[in-house]
Amino acid sequence: MNRFTHETPHVPPMIELGVNIDHVATLREARKGSRPDVVAAAKYCEKAGAHQITVHLREDRRHIQDRDVEQLAHVLQVRLNLEMGVTDEIIAIAHRLRPHTVCLVPENRREVTTEGGLDVAGRQDQLRDVIAGMHGHGIRVSLFIDPDPRQVDASAEVGADYVELHTGAYANAPDEAAREQELARLWDAANRVAETPMRCNAGHGLTVANLWPVALIPNLNEVNIGHDIIARALFIGLENAVKEILDILEKASFYRAAFPSRPEQDG
């Protein structure tokens, strides 16, 4: 640096964190009462530095209820991301409440959690209309997809603003070789997203232990993490559980700026 000038050092963009608070509602619904308070949990996450609150309003209402989404839409200072199946009922709720983002996901009443990505390539006409409707209400749209080039290309064709790459196969890989293979698929899909107008998010099964390699993806914009944060909050508190994920994301953001090609996954 020239001693007669003052240059502002480059600060890489921070990978943002969406905290999924569905399982706060799961605990509440076990007793069908009012505690723990979903809105209070969201505000703790907000206070800890989360950039977004994510909730999945399922067709069977197994955890998050309509009143939760209604209240969150009115009180949050950060973004609200509504995960949802592509059904007329939930679409109408989204149009009315206008969250910042909706993330369209496949939904099966019998599944314990979302088991795979949305088949965008096989539903382009329907999804193009749904996305246009959301855009007409000022809502951005993310599509939850497997890290498959066909699904990335189809997502761009139907007008999505974001894709969220399904990281479940990576998170559940049975051994190191399988994990590396799934990680390579995520990198390849993210590189393909970078060739489109969309932004690249990721989520499902990510934890404080396995997040680092995913967070090194150069164009990763955001991760959504729920179960691991809520589970760890039982032992270390919700704010601390959010902050330890944010710490990983901050370090990864600087690391990937220094090593934009695929670096060693040494954590």
Image: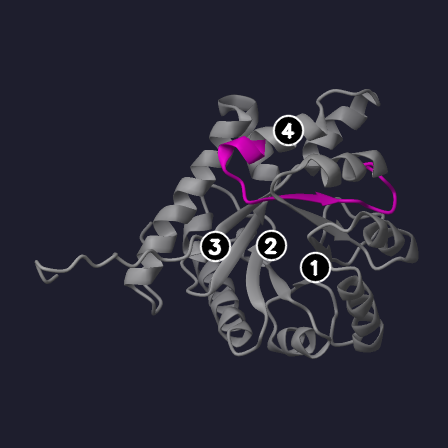
Rendering coords of residue 241 (x, y %): 50, 32
- Label 2: which secondary element: helix
Whether residue 221 sits left or right of residue 24 in the image: it is: left
Depth check, mark 4 against mark 2: the one in front is: 4
Q: Earlier in the sequence, mark 1 or mark 3?
A: 1
Residue holding disc 2: 168
- Residue at left offset 64%, top offset 28%: 41
Queried whether the magenta region covers residue 61, the answer comes back as yes
Of all residues, the one furthest to the right in this rendering is: 89
Kind of residue indicated by mark 3? Asp
Q: Are marks 1 and 4 in contact (CB under 8 Å)?
A: no
Residue holding disc 1: 116
- Residue at left offset 80%, top offset 27%: 29
Q: Quadrant of residue 1?
A: bottom left
Q: Earlier in the sequence, mark 1 or mark 2?
A: 1
Q: Earlier in the sequence, mark 4 or mark 2?
A: 4
Residue holding disc 4: 41
Whether residue 255 sits left or right of residue 177 in the image: it is: left
Queried whether the magenta region covers residue 259, the answer comes back as no
Q: Do the residues labelled 1 and 2 touch (CB within 8 Å)?
A: yes
Where does the magenta region start and end? 45-65
- Residue at left offset 71%, top offset 43%: 55
- Residue at left offset 53%, top offset 54%: 222
